[in-house]
Amino acid sequence: MYLFTVWLTIAVAAWAFVSAYHRYKDVFHPLIFTMPMFVFIYGYMPLKQVASFQLFSFLSEDQVLFFQVLVLAVLGAFIYGCLRGSSAEVSSANTAATYDPGVLQRTALVMGGAGMLAWAYMVHASGGLRGAFGAANGGVWSDIGYIRDSVYLLLLAIFLLLSKQLYSPRSKVWWASIVVFAFPWLIQALLGARRGPTFVLFVSISVSWYMARNRRPPFLATVVAGALVGFLMLFLVANRGKIFIGSQQELSVDNVDADTTSGAANEYIFGAGCVTAARQSGEYFWGKRILAYVLVRPIPHQLWPNKYEDFGVPELLDNAGVAKGGLQALGWVQIPGAAAAMVGDFWVELWWGAVPLAGLCGWAYGYCWSRAIVVGGVWNIQYVILVALSVYLVTQGIEAVEFRLLILSIPTWWVWRKAAIHAVEPVFA
């Protein structure tokens, strides 16, 4: 029965993938991006876990059967919400609005410059590039959260430069700006061997590039490119211990999917464990983590050292609190850095409210896509932001998306509002 539900999950996600393209003829539809990730985590991973005899050494068949049924419910709600949002009627009245590209250009350069300064500061504080990336799993760091999060301004600058209003491939300044602003993310993706930055950088730039020209790549080319990006992400993770400045170790493509059989740190096993532990304890957050990331996270730790403890969610300091119910009852030791992925994260937050939450997320993706298609403008960038963050939504959860969405979206809408005019001037001449 359990394997049947796993294969049913794969079939439902595959149907949604094909149906979305058949219905909308757009390779940038949100189901095209999200369904392969669902298949990998909730289809391929459990099949590999069963084949390697790891899964049932952590959980019983009844426990994983419940989890997989929950996966199907969450997946179905996300697909339904996405299709409903995609079919929502959108007025094209705002398509005639124009924006001052000079304002957009200046803002992009200022935000990109601020992001570069923040990144340069963290590189210096980390002992230079060799200090930051001279060991496996490297990266830059600052104890000040606002400096750490300022690197997202680099993405916002790139998205603005790749908007239809600023698209200028004949300009050397335009090209140089994009390359410079993308460099920190490229370094973090490759030398840091990070899946998230890799997906964000390659996918968001590709989507922005085509949307700025109102074009789409061929379906087959999109599938191949997506497979290559996915392979690169797995390759980086499989060789993470060998990738750093000065490394003499030989990289290998063997066992690039080893992360799918990594025991209690595996997203599928850990997510199923968190769901099981929460069911046994009856303890859920009921939205407190979501509120904490909006209301408490922006307050500097230096001003409020015990902010999460005082807010009543001290668990956030340990793997985003997804093991709130405790894994001790299962005989587990929680692995630092483990992620419960979307289904486990949603369940720990809202119990069966995970299903309507997934439907709401799907609707938001579908509606934003339809606005980008019909209205364009700022909605193009907003949709690119959602696409870029989809990897965090599916592989980690709502909290991993929440603060990044606010950091990228609020400045985007503010800039677009400031740039609204009735006459335009050329830039990057």
Image (tube, grey):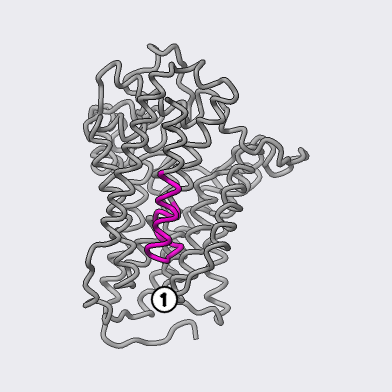
Q: Nearer the viewer, residue 227 or 69?
A: 69
Q: Residue 402: horizontal and vertical position, in percent?
A: 32, 46
Q: Image check: 246 left or right of 301? A: right
Q: Amino acid at mark 1?
A: Lys
Q: Which of the pair 313/401 is nearer the observer?
A: 401
| Quarter holding residue 309 | top left
**Residue shown at 36% from the left, 57% from the top:** 408
Residue 121 x, y percent position in the rendering: 51, 51
Is residue 169 within the magenta segment? no
Above or below, comparing residue 313 to residue 115 in the picture: above
Q: Residue at x 35, y 25 (%)?
A: 66
The residue wearing badge 1 is 164
Q: Is residue 140 left or right of residue 161?
A: right
Quarter of the image with the N terminus in it: top left
Which sits in the foreground, 25 or 389?
Answer: 25
**What range is drawn magenta here?**
12-33
Task: Say if the magenta span includes residue 13.
Answer: yes
Q: Taking 163 as reference, is 401 above or below it?
A: above
- Looking at the rendered structure, the secondary structure element under dot 1 is loop
What crowding class fits label 1: few (fewer than 14 Cα within 10 Å), some (14-19), or many (20 or more)? many
From the top left corner, tell me how far across and down residue 232 is, in percent.
62, 48
Q: Quadrant of residue 111?
A: bottom left
Residue 24 is situated, as x and y percent measured from the top left of the image, at 38, 65
Q: Which residue is at the front of the view, 313 or 69? A: 69
Residue drawn at x 29%, y 44% as measured from the top left: 77
* Prevalent SS, magenta region: helix
Q: Residue 240: which quarter of the image?
A: top right
